[in-house]
Amino acid sequence: MTDYMHSFDLFEPASVEEAAQLAEKYGKDGWIIAGGKDSFDWFKDRIKRPAAVVDLVNLDSLRGIRSTDDGIEIGALTTITDVVMHPELALNYSVLTDAASGVATPQIRNRGTLGGNLSQDTRCWYYRGGWPCYRAGGNTCYASGPTAMNREHCIMGSSRCVAVNPSDLAPALIALDAEFVIQGPRGTRFVDAEDFFMRPSIDIERMTILKPAELLTKVRLPLRWAGSRFYFEKIEDRKAGLRLITSPWKRPAPDTAPFEAKASGPYIICTMSKEYAEKNGYHDALMLDYRGYVAEGTGANIFFIKGNDIHTPIPDCFLNGITRQTVIEMATNQGFKIIERHIQPDEINNYDEAFLTGTAAEITPIRSIDNINFKTGDNSTTYKFMQDFSNLVNNTN
């Protein structure tokens, strides 16, 4: 049996009105793409199978940041990077640019949009895995149990569903009393940012108030908060470092499955390893290869630091990631010695620091592997690499 992504009709409307008409025509069988970063995950995992996809790529009227008499107006298709880099936003609405700079990785910020970030669905593992939970129309919440994978879910205010809205920009826009402009076949309406997001107690199957035929077109920031002082901090694991546990599953031999590309087969082992780690209270898993050597994380390459030497496994049975190659070049240019070799698990205790690299992970420090602890924090070499890599990707050197 051949496994392939579900086929659909693709539309690229030339106007907001045409996009709204298409959305109304297909209803729940349609899918709107803004930047497309979240949509691809739904499609490749076969969870969402729309009959039609409406790509907003041609709607230039929804891009850009403009000053108005009442404040600032941001088009919904404005990239998150453009929000981060805009000088007037940074000067007068820094809470928004601070929030935007913490969204995922530079690669995703370059493609992801303001509207897409605000309209995305929850990232609950069970819901995205196709489990018949409340949000998917079922009659239970699999994430609410004491042993469930719910580390990033809500701890208060839940109503049957404990999943949270994943938008980093939402809290900042609510704090700024932003106004959202929504357009549909029957006209335009304006809602406060706080009222845009749907609570599970009102409708457990929706994250926003958007109806199937409606589009978020603009976000307006009021002048009254311009220049105000805010403090924004994203509580996350990345800077503190991840806790890893050695997976019982191993990377297969190179003559078992292709490893030079992101083929679907190896992802199954990664998923099982990730699930094993989270069920045991860890962030991720360390995968060994078929010979018992250290290989990688479940979706990222791994490095170890000892003084001026940086050790990393030879990618002879796992993907030699682009971020991995970039980090090797960056560290070499800074005078570090890169040593690619086979690493035994019992050697891990010899290193001072460890980190993961990947498109999503970017550079993420490792706090511990099993019972072995590593240095993390502002004074670590890994943290300096994180800053240098971010500057490199954003061209801010």
Image (cartoon, rainbow, N blue to C red):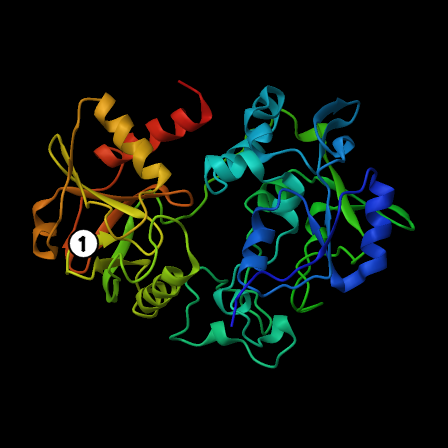
Q: Is 337 left, or right, of 94 in this rendering?
A: left
Residue 16, located in which quarter of the rendered image? top right
Q: Which residue is mark 1?
A: 294
Q: Residue at x 55, y 59 (%)?
A: 164
Q: Residue at x 26, y 32 (%)?
A: 328
Residue 354, located in which quarter of the rendered image? top left
Q: Is residue 341 visible?
A: yes
Quadrant occupied by the C terminus: top left
Q: Is residue 189 visible?
A: no
Residue 238 in picture, x, y percent from top left: 35, 45
- In the image, residue 176 above or below residue 128: above
Q: Is 129 left, or right, of 177 in this rendering?
A: left
Q: Is 195 left, or right, of 231 in this rendering?
A: right
Amino acid type, residue under disc 1 in the picture: Val
Q: Residue at x 51, y 72 (%)?
A: 1
**How many circles with numbers are drawn on the protein?**
1
Q: Is 171 left, or right, of 192 in this rendering?
A: left
- In the image, residue 365 above or below residue 135: above
